[in-house]
Amino acid sequence: MNDSFASEFRRALQTGFDEWGIEVLDEQQARMLRFAQMVLEGNERLNLTRITEPQEMAIKHFVDSLACLLVKLPAGNLRCIDVGTGAGFPGVPLAICRPGWDFILLDSLKKKLSFIDEALDALGITNARTLHARAEDAGQDHELRGQFDLVVSRAVARLPILVELCIPLLRVGGLFIAMKGAEGTQEMEESGRALRELGSSIAEVVNLELPLGMGDRTLIVIKKDAPTKKCYPRRAGTPSKKPL
Ligand code: SAM
């Protein structure tokens, strides 16, 4: 990894955080750079991301991940799960910036999680662990169901499907942040029945523009109002085949 990657990445990162008013310590930014370098190193083997240019990586992966911190969240340290974390977004940048919170990084693809395990170890991140599972199975596991203050998920499924994967994991009163692009508004309109069936409602919608003109984002913040009916989530594969 050359010096120009590092300096361009760090400059874009700082620009993004300044623009959004997010405070990230120098040491945390250095960890983000190291994680970005590890993603690039692992990319040939594991096909982790198509975004490899330093500015784009800083803004579209790292600053974007921290958009969750712009949402009004409960006070105190949160128990959080990233559903469909892939190469670790948004979970790893969030875990770096919120060392007091506890994170589970869930995905059904083992090879990506093995990469994250190596990275967590190399970066000395102790407040996050990976979990190899389908979200549908995790949502029916009594050790995970109804346990989380915060669920986050980016680029995993359309919203009517995604809510069935994510809401069962929340405690009543907890929040789910669906990280969407411009398509978020349309997906929200299609999710009314699913939200009601899952005892949840939209708490807030945050529209954002990524720094350096890198695109629009819609954060759909959903609150769990009531315990989830036992039948949800349905068997693995059913939410996407027959969305609520
Ligand atoms: N969240 C990451 C990001 O934004 O860079 C990864 C996005 S990637 C397009 C989608 C990820 O979701 C994949 O790694 C896939 O394995 C995972 N995924 C999709 N459906 C899932 C499910 N039902 N349970 C667990 N993981 C799932």
Image: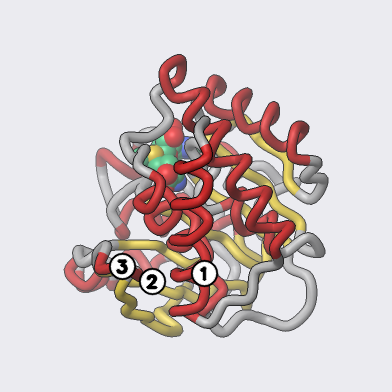
In the rendered image, which quarter is residue 125 located in?
top right
- The answer to whether residue 207 is above or below residue 105 is below
Type of residue at label 1? Cys
Mark 1: few/some/many CA within 10 Å (<14, 14-19, 20+): some
Q: Give the residue number, with chain letter if any, for mark 3.
A: 212
Q: What is the secondary structure assignment of the residue under circle 1?
A: helix
Residue 132 position, x and y percent, is: 61, 30
Q: Residue at x 49, y 55 (%)?
A: 62
First along the sequence among labels 1 and 2: 1
- The answer to whether residue 8 is above or below residue 114 is below
Q: Is residue 164 left or right of residue 244?
A: right
Q: Give the residue number, with chain letter if any, for mark 1.
A: 68
The residue furthest front is 3
Type of residue at label 3? Leu
Tags 3 and 1 touching, CB below 8 Å: no
Q: What is the secondary structure assignment of the residue under circle 2?
A: strand
Count the numbered circles shown.
3
Q: Give the residue number, with chain letter if any, for mark 2.
A: 219
Q: Is residue 223 left or right of residue 129?
A: left
Observer able to see residue 237: yes
